[in-house]
Image (spheres, rainbow, N blue to C red):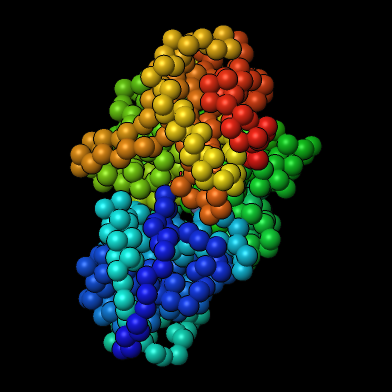
Amino acid sequence: MTIHQTQPFDGQKPGTSGLRKKTQVFMQPKFLENFIQATFDAIGGAAGKTLVLGGDGRFFGAAAAQTILKMAAANGAARVIVGQGALLSTPAVSHMIRKRKTDGGLILSASHNPGGPNGDFGVKFNMSNGGPAPESITEAIYERTKTLDSYNILDVADVDLETLGTSDLGGMAVEVVDPVADYADLMETIFDFDAIRAMFAKGFRMRMDSMHAATGPYAVEILERRLGAAPGTVVHAEPLPDFGGMHPDPNPTWAKELMAEMMGPNAPDFGAASDGDGDRNMILGAGVYVSPSDSLAVIAANATLVRSFRDGLKGVARSMPTSMAADRVAQSLGIPHYETPTGWKFFGNLLDAGKCSLCGEESFGTGSDHVREKDGLWAILMWLNILAVRGETVAEIVSGHFRKFGRNYYSRHDYEALPKDVANALLADLAGRLDTLKGLSVEGMTVAGADEFSYHDPVDGSVSNHQGFRILFEGGSRIVLRLSGTGTEGATLRVYLEKYVAGPEGLERDAQEALKPVIAAVEKIVGIARATGRTAPDVIS
Ligand code: G6P
Ligand code: ZN
């Protein structure tokens, strides 16, 4: 074992989802090493532990995996289970941790951020329940990064990560596994593959865009091989270090090609995409886009059609900025619903305690208690299973849902790379005025209340403050503002817009049109253009 002297780096504080930085920052000598040693130290050392390791195939991932293996061995770990070629989607890591009962795992990904030498890289530690480390651990990691003065690493040749099987690395077992098989088997236990296969056999057409990221091999195996979707159903299926230049974020802005196909003539029946590490999803039907918030609500309303939820859902949880559509479904089903801060990690306690079985976020994340991460392909299979049972189109299912529950028109407007001080000043100004907003009449709506969201975890009693600003209008419309916790450049201001229409009239409008009064209210109440000089958002989803 070699002990290397080192010095702390600034800014190794994990954000919403692990430590994310520009790839070049991560590639600085000792930067990764420091963060990994701090992680090992913060979890009580790696000695004797079994860990899972894998990532989304992005640039620097394979080299980082080698460094981590050599560090794990030098720190006395017993075994590391690593995906072949260092590839494992995030939900597959979560499943592997749970299935093999390991002490946790490390995920090498910056999720939906572009990859490559000029893109982003990231490292995230997951716990033995398969979910992202809670704030107590990420804080401990950060504290450790500030005082670290050495790290341990073996000075040996790289490990062969292409050949399946177990080898020895300085007394530690390195087990290279097929990244897809266990995950695909898990999906077979959850869904009715026969029903979905029969639907494909009858000519149901689908397009899955894996965006040259982690889900490619999983989607080909599950959709084309096991479910019999036509060969070529999955496009951009090969994971590439730079995602083939794509921005692997499954939303209408970045999944342009898929959007064009699904909105065009001769669109397939169903379209879907997923992100860099495979935990996000976008759902489309021929001519229709299903917002993530609506997708969560539709899945909740139809869950009992799927085998694993036959006996009903325990509860539904959504992040605070996610539209309130799922709450209406939970109320009608008579099951609890929860509102958590942004970040999948906040669902972990609810899932572990058996309080809810379905979770979702507006940021294209949907999942359940089968793993402790959101799961893109799971959500896509959920839709396929529901479509197979109901025999209706996506458009029919969504319209029927709105007729029954009303519609929460929804959109998110992002202002990217704002100077941090400008964004902070804007929100500080709003914070100072929150108490004065109640009763304000704007754009024909009346403010029912405004606050800064704090979460009181009902399981462990922990409190998370400063989780975003909410302005609620009478009648169920809403504005939410918060700063992104995942951006790597300046500050990204997210503005979440929601307008509730009970129906039966006015359910089939264009979302941006329907939201016009809410958008105008943001400018009047918050004054983004005034404070930032930006007159339009950079990304609308
Ligand atoms: C990651 C997390 C999600 C979260 C999202 C929010 O993707 O896994 O759970 O919703 O970040 O990102 P933001 O940039 O809005 O903080
Ligand atoms: Zn992701």
Can residue 316 be seen in the rendering of this structure?
no
Identify whether 194 is placed above or below 89. Answer: above
Q: Quadrant of the N terminus?
A: bottom left
Can residue 233 be seen in the rendering of this structure?
yes
Identify whether 397 is placed above or below 174. Answer: above
Quadrant of the image occupied by residue 336: top left
Using the image as rendered, state which of residue 63 and residue 294 is in the foreground. 63
Using the image as rendered, state which of residue 366 and residue 470 is in the foreground. 470
Residue 29 lies, in percent from the top left, at: 48, 78
Identify whether 365 is placed above or below 439. Answer: below
At a point 41% along the width and 41% down the height, the residue shown is 342
> In the picture provided, is 402 more to the left or to the right than 72?
right
Using the image as rendered, state which of residue 112 and residue 519 is in the foreground. 519
Instruction: Report the label total.
Output: 0
At a point 57% along the width and 26% down the height, the residue shown is 527
Quadrant of the image occupied by residue 52: bottom left
At a point 44% along the width and 19% down the height, the residue shown is 472
At a point 62% along the width and 13% down the height, the residue shown is 506
Residue 57 lies, in percent from the top left, at: 54, 67
Residue 510 lies, in percent from the top left, at: 67, 23
Q: Residue furthest right?
A: 265
Identify whether 233 is placed above or below 471. Answer: below
> In the picture provided, is 421 more to the left or to the right than 203?
left
Residue 343 lies, in percent from the top left, at: 40, 45
Q: Quadrant of the C terminus?
A: top right
Quadrant of the image occupied by residue 59: bottom right
